[in-house]
Image (cartoon, rainbow, N blue to C red):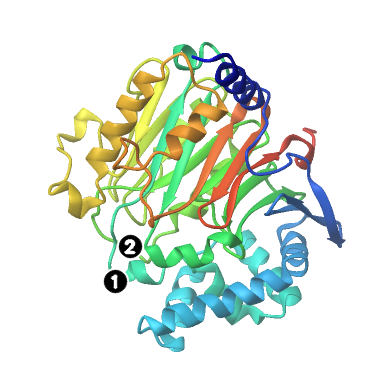
Amino acid sequence: MKKGKMLTLLLLLLIYSCGGESGGSPELTYISQFEGGRLYSAGSVSVLELRGTHYQMGRQYGMLLKNDLTTLYHLAVTTFVDLGFTPNRLQQIAASIYAVYPQKYKDILIGMAETSGLGIERQIVLNAIEWFPKVHAFVPHCTGIAVWGDYTADGPLIFGRNNDDAGLYRKFAGYTIVAVFNPTDSGMPVAVINYAGAIYAPNGMNREGIFLQLNSGNWDGYYIDRPSIFLTLFSFLQTYSTQEELNVAFQSVSANLSSIVNVADRNIAYSFECSTSAVKRRNPDSNGLMVSTNHFVDPSWGMSPPVPDEDNGWTARRRNNLLNLARAKKGLFNEGEMMEVLDTTIQEGGATQPPLTIYQIIAVPNNLTLWLKALGYFDWQRVELRTLFDPAH
């Protein structure tokens, strides 16, 4: 390799290993505050720091992101009406989801509705932004990969996540935000990564360094009269600080839809495979590697990957691609290498699926750091959570 190219490569590796980014400054820029809550930007990413009761945090959220919430609400309604949903049908679906929310999460939405200007009926429609198409058709999506130990040369655990969905969600990707909830009424501080106005946790990290994210699993129906597993995950993040505690908690889960929940701490990652009737914790694929797509892998299920693979979101191909990529990069992983993995498409031997990959996350529980990318809107942005979480009491 020529000397100039070698120097360039070394500089890039140094930037990534020191926590630099390709998409902008890691520093948070203060924007505004309201009733104790604050809004920052990390490059193009909105970051909320909320404090108080769940109701008070909802009021802060609604005011600080008022313009985004209004814009995204109208964009979402227009999009789904164009797909054939009537406004009344959108309201019915949203109300049924809201009806089984625990009160403290209803309180967030009630507070938001007061200050956003949307009112409660429109606020709960926005909260259901991911659900409308899924009541009629459900295609498995999303990918998770965690590496640690020998795969990172004994560096910190790194988790990579693709949030995949129907292509129409690319319209909403630019409204992917980080909301940090510091409750005073119940629960520990938690950061939730989701669309603006959506109060549930498909991805999140708590103050103790527990990171989790949800993939769809082997489809076996949708139970509207059960609590949403997304809210269950929010509650788990607010309540539990160890893998052992979470393992016990998951045994009581009665999922409203088949799901795969990947959970990491500073040292290891597991995959909870949740059907609508049972939960199994799957061990890592090897010492230092865990890969999860959209089919149950634990051998005790006695299940093979669904076929044909192309009709099931290429779940087997994505999983095999990531296992192969990870083994090829064993001992090399840092945040920059994980970015390269997540930027690799299925056709190139990875798992990313343009235009179905909406946003991507890298989490490093050891230092409470997130990286966030929304394809077509912003490149990798770093968000350091440590200063946004209230300290332990």
Q: Is residue 62 left or right of residue 216?
A: right
Looking at this view, is 16 or 28 the one in front?
16
Vertical comparison of 244 with 164: above or below: above
Front residue of 258 and 309 = 309
| Residue depicted at 71% across the width and 58% down the height | 54
What crowding class fits label 2: few (fewer than 14 Cα within 10 Å), some (14-19), or many (20 or more)?
some
Q: Residue at label 1?
A: 136
Vertical relation: 1 (above or below) 228: above
Q: Please say whether residue 300 is visible from this viewpoint.
A: yes
Residue 248 in view: no
> Where residue 223 is drawn, which disc sits there?
2
Residue 318 in picture, x, y percent from top left: 29, 39
State which mark lies toward you, 1 or 2: 1
Q: Give the amino acid at mark 1.
A: His
From the top left corner, tell me how far across and down residue 96 is, in percent. Answer: 44, 73
Going 34% across and 51% down the picture, which residue do you hit?
141
- Residue at 34% x, 31% y is 322
Q: Earlier in the sequence, mark 1 or mark 2?
A: 1
In this rendering, position of residue 377 left or right of residue 341? right
Gap between marks 1 and 2, in whole Å?
A: 13 Å
Amino acid of disc 2: Tyr
Give the SS element for disc 2: loop
